[in-house]
Image: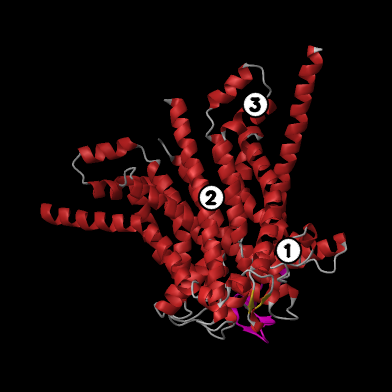
Amino acid sequence: MEKSLNWREFVITRLIKASGYSAILFVALIFFFLIREGVPTFEEVKMSSLFSARWYPIEEYFGILPLITGSIIITLGATLIAVPFGIGTAIYISEIAPRWMREILKPLVELLGGLPSVVLGFLGILVLSPFLRVFLDLPTGLTALAGSILLGGIAVPTVVSVAEDALDAVPRAYREGAWALGATKWQTIWRVTLPAAKSGVLTAVMLGVGRAIGETMTVMMVTGNAPILAIKLSNLFTPVRTMTATIAAEMGEVANGSVHYHVLFFIGMVLFLISLGVNIAASSMVFRAKKRAERILS
Amino acid sequence: MKNILTRNRHLTQRVGFILITLMAFATVIPIVAVVIYILAQGLPAISWEFLTGFPHDGMRAGGILPAIIGTIYLTIGTAIFSVPLGIAAAIYLSEYASDTPLTRTIRIAIINLAGIPSVVYGLFGLGLFVLFLNFGTSILAASLTLSIMTLPVIISTAEESLRSVPQGFRTVSISLGATRWQTIRRIVLKEALPGILTGVILGLERAAGETAPILFTGAAFFLPRLPHSPFDATMALPYHLFVISTQVPEMPIQIQYGTALVLLAFVLTMNLIATVIRSRARAKRQW
């Protein structure tokens, strides 16, 4: 009895440990398979061609610059929308709203995070882009702007929830100290609470940017998918094409092992590295902030 | 003079509060509007035939049963892999792991898994499950891909819920002679169950609504029958909505909105269940 119990305990403990390590294994596996299928690109496509401005795979033009600039312009637009609205909403929920309002708003923002991106893309096609076309008098509403607006909406819940956690974590004594010195609630928010939560709010922004850059279905559906070099502000009002949309749109039609196939995996590799960089930077910021908080408190 | 200053400060505060409040509402109102709009536009399309029939006439008529069933299969498949693995990983992080470099690496890996773009998961699933392991474009490959994507959501919410169980519960159980695993299974897991369940449902909700990871791993453009085995490809609601709204010309708008509504209802029901479980558990909690 005693013995079998120990044995079971031993097996289960091992299983649990292995599950714990699995996260590392999966990240490694993902990177390995991206490299395995993506690295042959370097042998098959010349660097000068890869970083050129022409993406036209049928004639073997694999310039990924238009895709990169497309992703950047849409992500920038989305960030400009998601950051003020996300942080504003987080401040409202954590500092201003009465309790009952908080109980309503939080699940609603969470709901936005759960809306399938394909549904937003669908509404983008049927409602947002016709509106933009008429309102801004454009030849087509399927533009970078439409993508930015919807992506902004998709990034908002991430920004709100992380920023709100950061604001919540600021000790109440900080606020009370400011109020006791005669500061208004508004002054306290801007000069005490927000600066104290700075690193958490920055993390929120970065995770929001990461969410926007990786979004696929919505941008594929509403941005028109024209691989043009988007380096001017006016490109906000033209169709563009992102890295994610290119993979999603073209992977289904390429032959396994072809040059085009390898290039698409290479783009996946670039996306993976971007998200790795964003997330490591964001999480190291959280760790640093924690250490500083511990130092202050000890 | 002083009076004016104070009045200014309070005026600034009032204007500022109004601005922030407006921003919060500008964020939330579109969410409600989207849900109501799809409900209003989609409801006329919903009928028994639409929910239980097969699509015909190039998907321009008939029902969406294969897509509904496909999404249910994929959600169940995802749950089979991600739930046990995710909860076990959460138990490891909350009950066994100490603060070592290895643990920190695991945490960073989880954060990164959460941030990897969904289409990159699709590439990975294609490379590993479809081609390397030779599962083909199948429910199995798509479920495995979605599982790994869902894992970080389940791990982080389950861990948070396990950690919120007071340390005293564990101490008492161990001091009564229970082993570590008995303590975890009978005390800690039992107390943390509602929180874990909430996380699991939210994770699966995300998986059910995703399109990009299943694009090249298991989604079928059109199937005249239901899938027979885990090695069959399947139609799925999110992919179907994508297909009929972008790939099929002259698609009746009613069917599009109807499909969007069914997908939204599927996802929102899961969201609602998770919210209810969470608020009930909070109300009942005695510690």
Disc 3: which residue: A188
Q: Compared to A120, does B125 lie above or below? A: below
Q: CA distance from mark 2 to mark 3?
A: 32 Å
Q: Chain of mark 3?
A: A
Q: Please state the horizontal and vertical placement of residue A207, each as a whole percent of the image.
A: 57, 50
Which residue is more in the foreground, A225 or A158? Answer: A225
Q: Which residues are magenta?
A: B41-62
Q: Residue at x 74, y 28 (%)?
A: B13
| Amino acid, disc 2 | Thr
Residue A151 position by quadrant: bottom right
Q: CA distance from mark 1 to mark 3?
A: 41 Å
Mark 2 secondary-structure assignment = helix
Q: Residue at x 78, y 17 (%)?
A: B5
- Residue B218 horizontal side relative to residue A178, left or right: left
Q: Chain of mark 1?
A: A
Which residue is more in the foreground, A97 or A140? Answer: A140
- Quadrant position of the N terminus of chain A in the picture: bottom left
Mark 2 is surrounded, within 10 Å at the Cα level, by few (under 14), some (14 to 19) or many (20 or more) other residues, namely some
Comparing marks 1 and 3, which lies closer to the viewer?
1
| Image mark for residue B275 | 2
| Amino acid, disc 3 | Thr
Mark 1 secondary-structure assignment = loop
| Residue B202 seen in the current view | no
Magenta includes A8? no
| Residue B168 seen in the current view | yes
Magenta includes B60? yes
Which residue is more in the foreground, A11 or A42? Answer: A42
Q: CA distance from mark 2 to mark 1?
A: 42 Å
Q: Please state the horizontal and vertical placement of residue B116, each as a whole percent of the image.
A: 52, 60
Mark 1 is surrounded, within 10 Å at the Cα level, by few (under 14), some (14 to 19) or many (20 or more) other residues, namely many
Disc 1: which residue: A230
